Image (tube, rainbow, N blue to C red):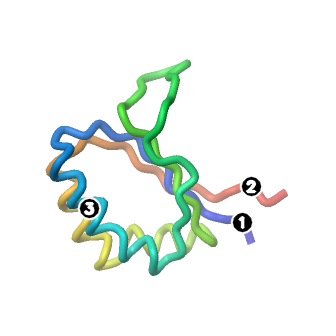
Amino acid sequence: MPKGYWIAHVDVRDPERYKDYIAAAKPAFEKYGARFLARGGAYEAVEGRGRGRNVVIEFPSLQHAKDCYNSPEYKIAKAIRQEVADAELILVEGFDG
């Protein structure tokens, strides 16, 4: 079964409150088997618009990725994130071939 991924591009407006988002999201990520492949770090935007923070999170499946996003645990974190950051977030199925 192919893995699932969250790919997020984020501009954080309030770094101190963003720490609250990270703490609030942790239970959902743990529950659904998230593994961070990229979390901030250096980047180079070679095409299109870049954002200050880029994150790639791997899940056991696309369904796990969807369930995490829609979970009651993550909804609490998402509300915080939406107050303190601008983001694009996609869920994508990995290639298993």
The residue shown at (47%, 69%) is 66
Q: Nearer the viewer, residue 93 or 52?
A: 52
Mark 3 crowd level (few <14, some 14–19, many ≥20, 10 Å Cα): some
N-terminal of the pair, mark 1 or mark 3, is 1
In the rendered image, residue 67, in percent from the top left (x then y), is placed at 45, 75
Q: Quadrant of the N terminus?
A: bottom right
Where does label 3 land, which residue?
Answer: 78
Disc 1 secondary structure class: loop
Q: Nearer the viewer, residue 30 or 85?
A: 30
Q: Which residue is mark 2?
A: 95
Image coords of residue 63 (percent x, y): 55, 73
Pointer 2: residues within 10 angstroms few (<14), some, or many (20+)?
Answer: few
Report how far apart the C-alphas of labels 2 and 3 lie in the structure.
27 Å
Question: Which secondary structure lies at badge 2?
Answer: loop
Residue that appears at 68% across and 57% down: 94
Tell me which numbered mark, 1 or 2, is placed earlier along the sequence. Answer: 1
Kind of residue at disc 3: Lys
Q: Tag 3's secondary structure?
A: helix
Q: Which residue is mark 1?
A: 2
Q: Residue at x 58, y 52 (%)?
A: 37
- Dot 1 amino acid type: Pro
Residue 73: x and y in percent read 30, 77
Number of marks present in the image shown: 3
Tags 1 and 3 in contact by the CB under 8 Å rule?
no
**Amino acid type, mark 2:** Phe
For the residues bearing labels 2 and 3, Cβ distance under 8 angstroms: no
Which sits in the foreground, 1 or 38? Answer: 38
Q: Nearer the viewer, residue 22 or 61?
A: 22
Q: Are marks 1 and 2 in contact (CB under 8 Å)?
A: yes
Against 91, is 38 above or below? above
Q: Earlier in the sequence, mark 2 or mark 3?
A: 3
76 above or below 10?
below
